[in-house]
């Protein structure tokens, strides 16, 4: 065996570092200028924390932020559940044409421009007599996140060998057992992938949220886009940097805690293909 | 499975906690929940201190929402769902709203401060008699340029934009009426021309401009020009004043052949629930001291003549942003051309965008 | 074997499809048949088949293809290297996190970074290449688009690679296959489902991009999304906007069929 296949050459690891640098460049740029006393995203004049102070003084902004995060978490969680159910449903369909059709329908929302989704949801809600606000935004976010969850979960489901299920049933597992102890653990990477993609979709969305929100309820995206006409103040930079740092701390913290609990953070797998 | 369930439980708990804090903050800031005023405005287009002051004075709680474009706002209001008491659209949008019966007439007896508005800015074509609206901020459209980067060139006419030396040096706003309008005005026609022959002529002339156009952009034009990404820009005066604040090397000029004057006005939509409060709000904003405070925060030009006395001379004396009647008489307000004609303008604009040769 | 349980799975998903997919599609198809004055007509469809819109469509597809291709080229090695790291879940998460930052802010950051006097040009100058016009070019447009979509490509490929049985790779190497052969004939085919799902998650949305076409490309690039946005908001010509949307949906359906469709039933990994 020539060389250890597990250790990539250093030159190649540099690639990974480079990707990280590129990915984080805009974040760092935004964070850098959030301390700019000059008030704009160029010509750094002096260091200041005034923008961070403004964040906490602007109660409306803080409320908007909390709303945004709550919506993101709720919609990601619920859409993941629906999406997983949907993906399982699709794999259970016998006819290839029907499952193709289902998948095509699934992807309609991904291909449709946000404007159209927002407008049609607005019409839908108006027809249903639903009051715009938290509920309408939440439902909309769930709605457009489901397809991406399905897309992330489906490949794992399709890879899964049916013999796993047969074996489990043979060994006396109930349908519920099969689901919770065979299928879900197997596809859990897909579930988490779907969850995080749904989170991304929700946090970033502007157009759909804009159309279906009301009664004072707003998300961070809507607020930021609305401020573009006046020039985005560095308060937004400060806020975004704060959010990012908090998320970073949470993510790393959770991971560290988890790593201590389990030796290797993955459930035991039955080897596929016998 | 356990890991998945655990994760989801944490997510739900966190989400509920966030909602809890948000509603606590909401209610601790709120006043008698019944007496509210819902205001729909551009982002960052009002001094937050003024909202606080209004709430203090009247005891009415202001629910504030923002939009980023007139069109989005119109679509939103047209389809209902939220009852706005106050909206601050631009002139052409007010035209549309009027035509579709979306506005209620103002009770002038309740807004005595209206008398402070400069007479030039009352009784405008889009709302004669100010039945439905009062002016909030106003401005013009013109050319902003960096004297250093254009070798001392002076801009005395729209035609100067077509100068070959300016290849790839111009940034334009992403708006059909404005861009096609420049074509029309440079040919001596009106900004509101509906003659398709004239429009085709303007389109052909604009195609000649494409080598000079670096990009057609939106609000980010401010950042781009302040960063000196291009030497010349076609912008609204509000943008120009913001850019000049950040980079005082630049200068703003309105070509004498004519240009556009724009207004953002306050209106009360028919879906309003607190009409009394809405009038109080309008009168409050028209108060000269408040208007001056707002002007200093927002940075645009105020139509409130009395407010000028409360503003520093360096702002009000700046002819570029507070032009006198000799200039404003030559400016046109965008008229509502109807859906078909607007569609035609936009088709031309789309073709103009596609016509541009790419690097 | 009876799978009566599948009916239960189908219910929430089916409800979602009817309410939020079928209903909007019907709405869009309905609107596409009215012109700007509300008259029933198929004129919008005729307008779509004119050079302006056909050109736009071709260009949208071309850019979507390029963006997907480059995303794949960047994402695959990244995902592969990630699976080799010690705390791969953590690094993966760290890689996804920048996508949670607001898009408009990131676009402004790119405007600042790619600007004539920005850090990238400063770097180029220091290295001796000299300043270049980066903004408003095809390059910056595709670069930023790839930046935005790369996480969508990394995740499914990472998952597929992670599942890969390392002994398969070892076996191939033992049998004398070169690194490239091993990749081409063992690793890649086994991860193709991840690649497919990533490609779909990228290609489909890029067809209707319009935010970055303006912010980064300065409208030098016009996609169908630009036209739709304009029709829906500015001209209030929902008819034409809906018509373009109909074609987008049809195009998406075609792509689904061409890239192997729904793959119902079980697929065996061999």
Image: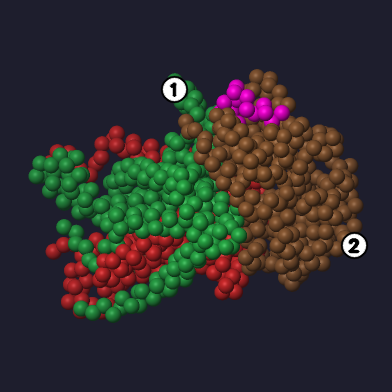
> Where is residue B300 shown, x and y percent of the image?
75, 43
Q: Residue furthest front?
A: B197
Whether residue C213 appears in magenta in the rendering, the answer is no
> In which chain is the residue bearing label 1?
C
Q: Quadrant of the N terminus of chain C?
A: bottom left
Residue found at x 16% / y 51%? C167
Residue B62, picture quadrant: bottom right
Of the chain colours in the picture, the one used for chain C is green
Whether residue B315 is visible, yes or no, is no
Instruction: Please report, as a chain letter, where disc 2 is located.
Output: B
Q: Which mark is residue B109?
A: 2
Chain A painted colour = red
Q: Secondary structure at mark 1?
A: loop
Which quadrant: the C terminus of chain C?
Answer: bottom left
Colour-to-chain, brown: B
Is C88 on the left-hand or right-hand side of B90?
left
Mark 1, residue position: C129
Q: CA distance from mark 1 to mark 2?
A: 68 Å
- Indicate the colouring scheme: by chain
- Residue in the picture at 20% in, 68% down: A162
Residue for point 85% across, 38% down: B325
- Please state if B118 lies on the left or on the right of A142 as rendered: right
Q: Camera-side residue: B301 or A85?
A: B301
| Residue B196 appears in the picture as rendered | yes
Q: Work out whether residue A90 or residue B72 is closer to the camera in this orientation and state it.
A: B72
Q: Which residues are magenta?
A: B157-173
Q: Are there few (<14), some (14-19), or many (20+) residues within 10 Å of tag 2? A: few
């Amino acid at each position: 065996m020539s060389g250890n296949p597990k250790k990539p050459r250093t030159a190649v690891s540099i690639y990974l570092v480079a990707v990280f640098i590129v990915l984080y460049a805009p974040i760092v740029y935004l964070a850098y200028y959030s301390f700019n006393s000059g008030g704009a995203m160029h010509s750094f004049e002096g260091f200041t924390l005034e923008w961070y102070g403004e964040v906490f003084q602007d109660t409306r902004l803080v409320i908007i932020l909390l709303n945004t995060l709550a919506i993101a978490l709720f919609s990601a969680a619920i859409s993941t559940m629906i999406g997983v159910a949907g993906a399982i449903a699709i794999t259970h369909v016998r006819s290839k044409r029907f499952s193709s059709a289902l998948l095509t329908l699934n992807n309609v929302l991904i291909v449709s421009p946000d404007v159209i989704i927002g407008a049609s949801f607005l019409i839908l809600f108006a027809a249903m007599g639903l009051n715009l606000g938290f509920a309408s935004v939440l439902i909309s976010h769930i709605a457009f996140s489901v397809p991406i969850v399905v897309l992330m979960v489906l490949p794992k489901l399709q890879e899964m060998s049916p013999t796993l299920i047969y074996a489990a049933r043979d060994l006396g597992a109930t349908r519920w057992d099969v689901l919770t102890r065979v299928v879900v653990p197997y596809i859990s990477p897909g579930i988490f992938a779907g969850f995080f993609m749904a989170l991304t979709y929700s946090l970033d969305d502007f157009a759909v949220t804009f159309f279906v929100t009301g009664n004072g309820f707003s998300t961070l995206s809507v607020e930021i886009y609305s401020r573009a006409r006046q020039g985005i103040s560095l308060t937004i930079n400060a806020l975004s940097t704060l959010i990012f740092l908090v998320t970073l701390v949470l993510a790393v913290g959770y991971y560290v805690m988890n790593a201590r609990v389990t030796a290797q953070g993955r459930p035991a797998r039955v080897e596929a293909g016998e | 499975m356990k890991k998945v369930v655990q994760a989801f439980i944490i997510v739900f708990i966190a989400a509920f906690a966030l909602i809890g804090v948000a509603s606590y903050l909401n209610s601790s800031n709120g006043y008698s929940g019944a007496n509210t005023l819902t205001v729909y405005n551009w982002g960052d287009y009002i001094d937050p201190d003024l909202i606080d002051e209004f709430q203090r004075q009247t005891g009415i709680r202001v629910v504030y929402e923002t939009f980023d474009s007139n069109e989005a706002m119109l679509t939103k209001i047209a389809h209902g769902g939220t009852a706005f008491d106050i909206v601050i659209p631009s002139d052409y949008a007010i035209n549309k709203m009027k035509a579709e019966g979306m506005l209620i007439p103002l009770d002038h007896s309740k807004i005595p401060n209206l008398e402070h508005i400069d007479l030039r800015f009352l009784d405008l074509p889009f709302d004669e008699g100010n039945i439905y609206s009062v002016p909030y901020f106003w401005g013009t459209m013109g050319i902003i340029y960096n004297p250093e980067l254009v070798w001392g060139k002076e801009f005395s006419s729209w035609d100067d934009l077509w100068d070959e030396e300016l290849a790839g040096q111009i940034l334009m706003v992403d708006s059909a009426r404005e861009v096609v309008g420049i074509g029309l005005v440079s040919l001596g026609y009106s900004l509101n021309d509906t003659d398709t022959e004239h429009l085709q002529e303007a389109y052909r002339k604009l195609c000649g401009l494409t080598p000079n156009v670096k990009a057609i952009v939106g609000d980010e034009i401010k950042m781009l020009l302040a960063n000196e990404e291009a030497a010349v820009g076609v912008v609204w005066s509000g943008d120009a004043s913001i850019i000049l604040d950040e980079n005082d090397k630049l200068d703003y000029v309105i070509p004498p052949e004519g240009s556009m004057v724009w207004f953002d006005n306050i209106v009360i939509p028919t879906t309003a629930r607190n009409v009394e409060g809405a009038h109080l709000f309008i009168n409050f904003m028209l108060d000269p001291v408040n208007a001056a405070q707002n002007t200093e925060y927002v940075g645009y030009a105020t139509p409130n003549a009395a407010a000028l006395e409360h503003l520093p001379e360096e702002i009000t004396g700046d002819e570029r942003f507070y032009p006198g009647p000799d200039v404003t008489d030559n400016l046109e307000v965008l008229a509502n051309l109807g859906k078909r004609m607007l569609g035609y303008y936009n088709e031309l604009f789309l073709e103009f965008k596609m016509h541009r040769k790419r690097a | 074997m009876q799978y009566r349980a599948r009916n239960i799975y189908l219910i929430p998903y089916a409800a979602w499809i009817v309410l939020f997919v079928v209903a909007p599609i019907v709405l869009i198809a309905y609107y596409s048949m009215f012109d700007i004055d509300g008259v029933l007509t198929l004129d919008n469809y005729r307008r779509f088949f004119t050079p302006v819109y056909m050109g736009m469509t071709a260009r949208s597809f071309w850019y979507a293809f390029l963006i997907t291709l480059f995303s794949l080229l960047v994402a695959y090695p990244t995902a592969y290297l990630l699976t080799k790291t010690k705390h791969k879940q953590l690094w993966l998460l760290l890689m996804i996190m920048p996508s949670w930052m607001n898009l408009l802010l990131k676009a402004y950051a790119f405007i600042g970074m790619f600007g004539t006097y920005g850090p990238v040009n400063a770097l180029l100058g220091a290295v001796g290449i000299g300043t270049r016009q980066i903004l408003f070019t095809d390059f910056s447009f595709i670069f930023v688009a790839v930046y935005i979509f790369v996480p969508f490509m990394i995740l499914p490929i990472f998952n597929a690679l992670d599942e890969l049985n390392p002994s398969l790779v070892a076996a191939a190497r033992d049998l004398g296959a070169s690194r490239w052969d091993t990749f081409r004939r063992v690793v890649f085919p086994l991860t193709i489902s991840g690649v497919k799902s990533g490609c779909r998650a990228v290609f489909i949305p890029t067809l209707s991009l319009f935010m970055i076409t303006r912010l980064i490309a300065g409208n030098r690039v016009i996609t169908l999304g630009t036209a739709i946005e304009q029709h829906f908001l500015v001209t209030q010509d929902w008819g034409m906007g809906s018509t373009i949307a109909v074609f987008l949906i049809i195009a998406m359906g075609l792509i689904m069929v061409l890239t192997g469709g729904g793959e119902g039933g079980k697929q065996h990994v061999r």
